[in-house]
Structures are given as structure tokens and as C-alpha cells.
Image: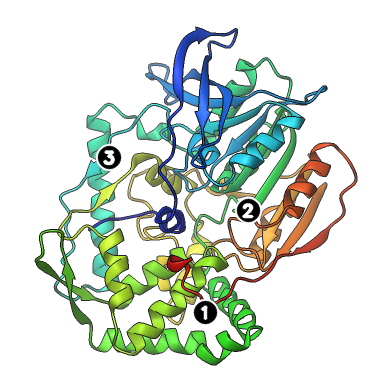
Amino acid sequence: MKTWKHPLLAAALAALILVPPGLAQPTSVRNAYGEEAIEFTAQSGDSVAAFHGTINVPENRADPDSRMIEVSYIRFPATGDHPGSPIIYLSGGPGGSGSATARGPRFSLFQEMRQHGDVIAFDQRGTGGSTELPRCVSTEFVTETEAVSDADYAAAQLRAVEACGDFWRQQGVDVRGYTTRESVQDLAALREHFGAEQMTLWGISYGSHLALAALKDIPGQIDRVLLASAEGLDQTVKMPAQTDHYFTRLQAAIDSQPAARALYPDIAQLMRRVHARLDAAPVMLQLPTEDGTTLPFLLQRRHLQGFTSGLISDPQYVALLLMLYTQVDAGQYELTTMLLQRFWDIGEPITLSAMPTAMDLASGISDARLAEFERQLPDSLVGGYLNFPMPQIRGAWDGFDLGDEFRQPPQGDTPVLLLSGTLDGRTYLDSQAEAIAGLTDVTRIIVRNAGHNLYMTTPEVPAVMHRFMRGEPVADGEIIVELPDLTANPLEQ
């Protein structure tokens, strides 16, 4: 079975229609930063001169005998006459790569941001071009031909995480170093590497989580912060009730399109009906393989909830979700089969990556939030799968949680611009407001009809970003983007 980090599912779906990323080709020339001059090629085929650099940092700063690891970045030099502080891009996930993001649809925005200073596509420790960590192939298997309860499925994940912790330690990886707080210190080291007094942080999703932690731990080193789809320090696990409220907003968006409203008059009722039917009678599918044979696969409620957790990230994927549930409700499984073939490795054990597993375990969840999560769970639409396997694996590694002090929101007067989408199914308007409540110089822009990945939804978003970066007055406000056709199949566009 393929275990994926659900926030990355939408990106994987987008990859179905994207060309493979280009590779940066280094030369032997090095500058004062020890960087190599490269030709950086985006997925679009566009190329630009850039620099590839690394810094060496302790894997675990609390251990005086820690090994040193390499942290990698791509630097796009400033184009303006009066460049400001270096702009450090922080990817989401956790587990996303800054250099990979720069090759994707945001390539042009990375280039635009150079007018304000050097733009650094940062590969956080354990990601992208930074020191590679071995993947852990556990001995835990979850049967795909028999019904498995949520509790048993979670227990298998917990056992896999426990075993993988031992595996990584045996491989020489000090997992204690893979926490958001250690990544904050990497940012401090990167600022020092550039000889800059301060740095600007530019992040999204988990990248905002890292930026908010930096505002707590190294506030004097930060010039300003530009965030989208913010995840607070106590929001690694999203609350089921807030996810249900998202579906209320989604229904309102559906109702605004007569054709979509006719097809999907009550998406919540549809989902509950499908879930109840699969709970009562899971469906045995036969999945085609490359050699012409088929493999049996028992479709259960949790599989649809897992797909849902990724597809609600952005409205352009919602049509796929609506089609998926409508087909299953009608006893049709073509789309389900396609998604399972694409995202599931039949018969494979639970396989984990070190960086996202460790980062989520360390950021954790407070006792009070966990109690509320469990109270809301039974009647929720996505259940415990929005952030799976958190909080199910909480406490897998003794003493690893950073604690409630870490999870307290930052305070201060650093200028912050926060962009939030009304149809973001991963981070929500109310929770984003909570995440920045202790900050006194925040400008908030609501992007109506946008989702989690909102930077490229309209030219108005970069325009606001540029005004903020120039230090011009920017007031709280709203940007409206066109809602995609929720009846259209995104795989055919």
C-alpha cells in the first residue's frame, strides 16, 4: 500500500498533466558564497541563470557530537536597483522542496519576486537537494482484501512509525534533529551565510508553520513575512468540525452554478450516504495491472475519505471529488479504480519518509486539542483522515513532542501579509485568524473562491505581494477569483 502525505495528493494529481521537472546543471565555477552557477530550467521549459549553494549544519544542535548535514538552496539573484533582505521561500508539506516548487507553476512568481531581493528556493533539512534521508519500508502490511477498522488501520501506522524510528536511528539518522525548531535555526544559519542582518520569509501551509515558529524563536532576524494558507503552531491536526464547515462553503459555491446545483444538491448527504453504504457492505474491486491481470481490492469508506482529504485542497480538484462520490453512489467505480491504480501500490508495506513523519510528530497536538478532536470525530465527513496519520501516531517516539510552549502562537510587530482562500479545504479562515492572533502588524487579504494553493490564481495576488514587499500601505481586503466549473472533469482539461 502506498502511504502518501495527504496535502501532497493534489500536487500529485496535477502532475498527471504536467511535464517532468527540468534539472539544474551545475558547473565548476563557485562564487563568494561557495555557490555553483547553474542554468535553472522550469517545468515550462523556461530557463534562467541562478546559483546552487549549500550550508552545513548540525543534525541535532542539542548533541555536541552531532553529525553535520547539508542544507541546499537555489538562489535567484535580485534584479532591482535597491534589493532588500534575502527572501527565503518555505515549502509546505512538511516534506515539500523549495527548489521543486520553483520549477513548477510558481516559477514566474519566483522571478517576479527578485525585484525585491535575492530569492532563495530553500530545501528544508531532509528535503530536495539537502542531505537525503533513507525511506523506511516497514514490515507492516494492511490487507486490501478484507475489511480493516479505522482503529486497526491506525494501529498499523503507529507500529510502522515506531519501527521506522528504530530503522532511521540504525541508519545513522538522529531523528531528534528533524523538528520545526531545528529548521528555524537552519534559517538563522542561512541568514548568517548570506551576511544579511535580516531575512524575509515567504511561505505557504507548513512553510507558514515554520515561519510562525521563526517569529517566536528569532524575531529580530526577520524583516517581514509573507504567508498563504497559514497553519498555526497548534494546528498540525485540523479540527473535524472546521472541515465540515468547509463543505458548507463548498455547497454554497456549488449552488452558485445552476448546472452543478442540479447535479449535487447536497454533497454532505451524498458523502454520508456513500460512507454508510461502504461501512455496511465494502465493495470488492478488480484493479487491472500492467501485465493484463487483475488484483482484488476491497473498497472501504476510509479510502474515499483519504482521497477527499487531498481533493478538497483547491476548487479545481473538487469536480473530481464530486464525480467520485456520484459514481460510487451509482455503483460505478471507473474513477475510483483509476485513482487507486495511480496512488496505491497493491500488496506493498507501509512506507514512510523521515522528515514529514518527524516534523509532524514533533509539532504534535496538545491534550486539550486532541480531546476536542476526538469529540468531533464520530460524525465528521472526513473523519480522522484529513491529516492522517496524525494524530493517530501521537507519542510514537517517547519525549519527541516539542510541547505546549512551542504550540503557543507568536507575538510581535513584524509586518505580516496573510493571504487566505475561502475554498481552502486544508487550512481554514477561522483557524488562520487564530494562528496570527498575537501579531499586531498583520494585513489580511481574503481571496474569494481560491483554495490552498492560491498564489497563481490571479495577477491581483502578486500585485498585493509586491506592494507589501515595497513597504507601501496595504489594507485588509478581498480579491475575487472566478470559480471553476464544478461540473467539468479536470482530467480532461
Disc 3: which residue: 135
Where is 164 relative to 307, above or below? Answer: above
- Mark 3: which amino acid? Arg
Residue labelled with disc 1: 487
Q: Which disc number belongs to residue 230?
A: 2
Left or right of 425, for residue 345: left
Rendering coords of residue 81 (x, y %): 82, 22
Tag 3 secondary structure = loop
Q: Residues within 10 Å of mark 2 (few under 14, many from 20)?
A: many
Q: Secondary structure at mark 2?
A: strand
Q: Is residue 186 above or below residue 269?
A: above
Percent coordinates x, y for residue 179 in the rendering: 47, 38
Mark closest to the chain's N terminus, 1 or 2: 2
Residue at 66%, 83% in the rendered image: 256
In this rendering, is residue 78 above or below 479?
Answer: above
Query: Which badge, 1 or 3, is on the more N-terminal residue?
Result: 3
Alpha-carbon span between mark 1 and mark 3: 39 Å
